[in-house]
Image: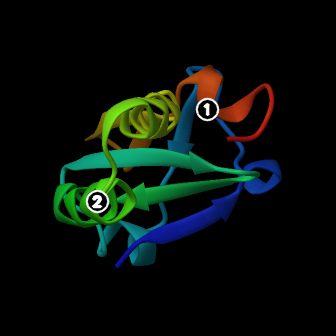
Amino acid sequence: MAIVKDIKDIILDPGGRYYLPAKELANLSEKVMLVRRGEKILFLTKEEWDELEEKELKGLKGAVLRRKRRSLFSSISFEEIHTGNRLHIPSYLLEGGSN
């Protein structure tokens, strides 16, 4: 099950990592797809990402498909959960304008 967090609620340690509480960690695998949507970050498993990607791109062609892919892929990161239930969140997902 995807986890959705407001960007303002994500607090990072000095190393740029977010601590995943046990109840959130139970819903994820060792690797997590982080997706920015507006002012929120979605924490997805690979399977959930595949479903989202298919849904977002289904039926699109040509320039519309390229624009959507560019938008979708500019706001993601595939990260591994580290020891101590910590997950690196790249600064480009937390800063700047919303996607």
**Measured from the top left, where is residue 52 in percent x and y?**
33, 63
Instruction: Please name the residue that numbered disc 1 is placed on.
Output: 93
The first of marks 2 and 1 along the sequence is 2
Residue at mark 2 to residue at mark 1: CA–CA distance = 27 Å
Q: Is residue 22 above or below residue 91?
A: below
Element on which disc 1 rests: helix
Residue at 64% over, 62% down: 5
Q: Which mark is residue 59?
A: 2
- Answer with the quarter of the image where residue 4 lies: bottom right
Between label 2 and label 1, give the one nearer the viewer: 2
Q: Nearer the viewer, residue 1 or 14?
A: 1
**Measured from the top left, where is residue 19 in percent x and y?**
52, 49
Q: Is residue 66 left or right of residue 28?
A: right
Residue at 18% over, 50% down: 30
Quarter containing the N terminus: bottom left
Residue at 52% over, 34% down: 71
Near mark 1 (Cα within 10 A), the count class, few <14, some 14-19 or many ≥20, is many
Residue at 79% over, 25% down: 96
Looking at numbered disc 1 in the image, what kind of residue is underneath it? Leu
**Measured from the top left, where is residue 77 in percent x and y?**
39, 33
| Colour convention | rainbow
Q: Is residue 95 above or below residue 78?
A: above
Q: Nearer the viewer, residue 52 or 65?
A: 65
**Measured from the top left, where is residue 73 in percent x and y?**
41, 32
Q: Nearer the viewer, residue 39 or 89?
A: 39
Q: Is residue 29 left or right of residue 63?
A: left
Q: Nearer the viewer, residue 19 or 50?
A: 50
Element on which disc 2 rests: loop
Quarter containing the C terminus: top right
Looking at numbered disc 2 in the image, what kind of residue is underneath it? Gly
Q: Is residue 69 left or right of residue 17?
A: left
